[in-house]
Amino acid sequence: MAWKGAEATVTKEGATVRKKRLKKKYRDAQLDALLRSRRTRREARILRKAKAAGAPVPELLKEDERKCELQLSLVKGTLMARLVEEDARELQALSAASGTALAKLHAAGIVHGDYSTSNIIASRTPAVTVIDFGLSEFSDSLEERAEDVLLYRKSLREKQALFKPFCKAYERQFPVGTSVVRRAEEILKRARYAER
């Protein structure tokens, strides 16, 4: 079983998953190899730091910078995006768990870059695992943290009531969480103002 994204292919191999960064034919071959190798190394470092900080992420089993591959533990469960569509009963608890997970990442100095219900796997209520760190960075930027919060909110679509338990858990777990949520609200207001 394999999935292909913009940057990588992900292949299930028994109890593991292999993520391989794709070559970009439009880039110079040397530059492409360098970028893919660096991004693979960065993603591996982020996964290790996130795991050490107690964030619910897949375990990094193997890293091969030369092949631009990561081998990760397989996470069983259902994408939270699917549960949101189905209006599952346990969504309040899962949304709170998602807030706690993001708080742990941010406290470790990691911004996800694509924190949405499509990158959260729900396994045992209210357990979640955050996946796909391809766009992640090491950053303590209030603005970048707020963007993670906003991406999550957007991914809830019409289920905005789920944002409240997310924020409560995020703010409770992360010392500057209230400031991040306020900044997210400011960004949202700027965007609405710009649309007028």
Image (cartoon, helix red, strand yellow):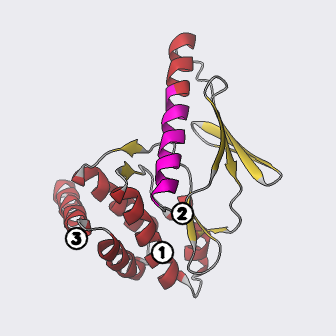
Is residue 157 visible in the rendered image? The answer is yes
Q: Nearer the viewer, residue 31 or 4?
A: 31
* For residue 140, side relative to residue 76 (left or right): left
Q: Find residue 124 and report its horizontal and vertical position in percent.
A: 64, 77
- Looking at the picture, which amino acid does disc 1 mark? Ala
Is residue 154 visible in the rendered image? The answer is no
Give the mark toward the camera: 2 or 1.
2
Element under disc 3: helix
Q: Is residue 106 above or below residue 61?
A: below
Q: Distance between the residues labelled 3 and 1?
A: 17 Å
Which residue bears the numbered disc 3?
178
* For residue 4, side relative to residue 148 (left or right): right
Q: Which residue is drawn at 35% across and 57% down?
A: 106
Q: In this view, does 162 lie above or below 129?
A: below
Element under disc 1: helix
Which residue bears the numbered disc 2?
56
Q: Find residue 66 and report its horizontal and vertical position in percent.
A: 64, 22
Q: Which of 80 and 123 is in front in this view?
A: 123
Which residue bears the numbered disc 1?
97
* For residue 14, side relative to residue 171 (left or right): right
Residue that sits furthest to the right in the current view: 14
User: Mark 2 near mark 1, Cβ–Cβ under 8 Å?
Assistant: yes
Element under disc 2: loop
Q: Which stretch did the figure color magenta?
A: 38-53
Q: Residue at x 22, y 57 (%)?
A: 191
